[in-house]
Image: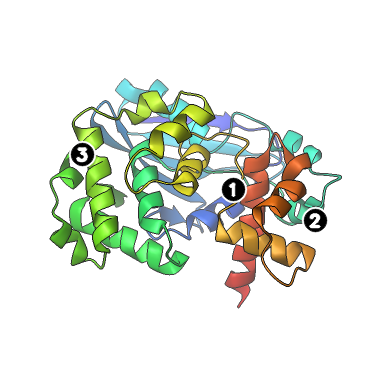
């Protein structure tokens, strides 16, 4: 066992981070103790790490626990990126100080973008979530992981690409996957399993190259590719204009009668670069909070 303490530049509100992680039932979150267990597969080894907040929004301090020191440096590097400890949120908040998003950023101050725990699960989850309401999307993802993944130390790991590639459409149909969605997940998994697609290498490429590579894969459109860039690769300047949640948030923000079209969204968001990913997150939070209050 090992333990490492890390301080982060304020503001960083881990309680709000945990609140958003709780939207996904697969996450092992303990709000009372301010901890989350993080499943990582490092060089083929499934490992569980615990991230615990010891500080507060103005003095963020974290304690990370791991099982073996062999992969400590690799795990810490990944965890720092997952929880966005590498760039001060204060700088990002200042950028939006004079924008139309000022009040939303004030309400959700210190909320960080938290990445999915690995590239494959991010892309699979994006495919499953396509054209579904959020509640059923999480239910379907949970069924998939419970049926074909595995659990370690109370944390669920997604099935490996090799495991998913060997599934049949009928097996996924039993979970209420559509035929096409089942084919998409199996097909993607097959490309990764046979080495045709290396997500680790792809995630290091420029945004446009990643999008152009992914949209050639059956079942992956621009929305899925952009979400992979945002929540998988952690790119800072993504604004998925086809996302219904963002459209609804803008409709609410500007008091529109109908959801904005893409040209209107482009106009609204022009001044939010180069932190469009954070504009996306805080707009999502604005409508998620409204749903939670109902």
- Of labels 1 and 3, the one closer to you: 3
Image coordinates for residue 151, horizontal then vertical, percent? 24, 50
Label 3: element kind: helix
Residue 147 image point, x, y percent: 19, 58
- Does residue 262 appear to the left or right of 133 in the view shown? right
Considering depth in this image, is 257 or 112 the residue closer to the camera?
A: 257
Q: Secondary structure at mark 2?
A: helix
Residue on which the image places disc 2 = 103
In the figure, residue 3 lies in which quadrant?
top left
Q: Check disc 1 and report the residue beneath it.
A: 14
Residue at the right extreme, as displayed? 98
Residue 208 position in % (x across, y down): 52, 30
Q: 160 or 85: nearer the eye?
A: 160
Q: Secondary structure at mark 1?
A: helix
Res. 153 visible in picture: no
Question: In the rendered structure, which disc, 1 or 3, sits on the residue that comes first in sequence?
Answer: 1
C-alpha separation, residue under disc 2 versus residue under disc 3: 45 Å
Name above or below for residue 49 compared with residue 158.
above
* For residue 189, side relative to residue 138 (left or right): left
Q: Which residue is mark 3?
A: 190
């Amino acid at each position: 066992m090992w333990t490492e303490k890390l301080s982060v530049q304020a503001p960083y509100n881990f309680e709000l981070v945990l609140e958003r992680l709780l939207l996904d039932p697969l996450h092992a979150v303990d709000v009372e103790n301010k901890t989350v267990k993080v499943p990582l597969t490092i060089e083929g080894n499934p490992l569980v790490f615990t991230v615990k907040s010891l500080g507060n929004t103005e003095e963020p301090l974290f304690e990370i626990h791991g099982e073996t020191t062999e992969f400590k440096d690799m795990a810490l590097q990944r965890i720092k990126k997952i929880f966005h400890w590498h760039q001060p949120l204060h700088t990002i908040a200042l950028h939006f100080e004079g924008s139309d998003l000022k009040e939303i950023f004030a309400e959700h101050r210190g909320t960080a973008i938290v990445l999915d725990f690995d590239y494959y699960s991010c892309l699979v989850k994006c495919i499953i979530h396509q054209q579904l309401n959020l509640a059923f999307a999480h239910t379907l993802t949970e069924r998939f992981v419970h049926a074909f993944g595995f659990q370690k130390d109370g944390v669920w790991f997604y099935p490996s690409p090799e495991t998913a590639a060997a599934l049949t459409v009928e097996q996924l149909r039993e979970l209420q996957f559509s035929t096409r969605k089942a084919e998409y997940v199996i097909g993607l998994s097959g490309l990764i399993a046979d080495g045709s697609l290396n997500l680790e290498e792809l995630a290091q490429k420029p945004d446009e190259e990643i999008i152009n590579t992914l949209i050639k894969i059956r079942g992956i459109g621009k929305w899925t590719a952009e979400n992979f860039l945002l929540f998988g690769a952690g790119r800072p300047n993504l604004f998925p204009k086809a996302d219904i949640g963002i459209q609804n948030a803008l409709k609410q923000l500007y008091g529109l009668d109908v959801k904005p079209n893409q040209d209107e969204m482009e106009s609204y968001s022009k001044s939010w670069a180069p932190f469009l990913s954070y504009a996306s997150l805080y707009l999502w939070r604005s409508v998620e909070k409204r749903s939670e209050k109902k």
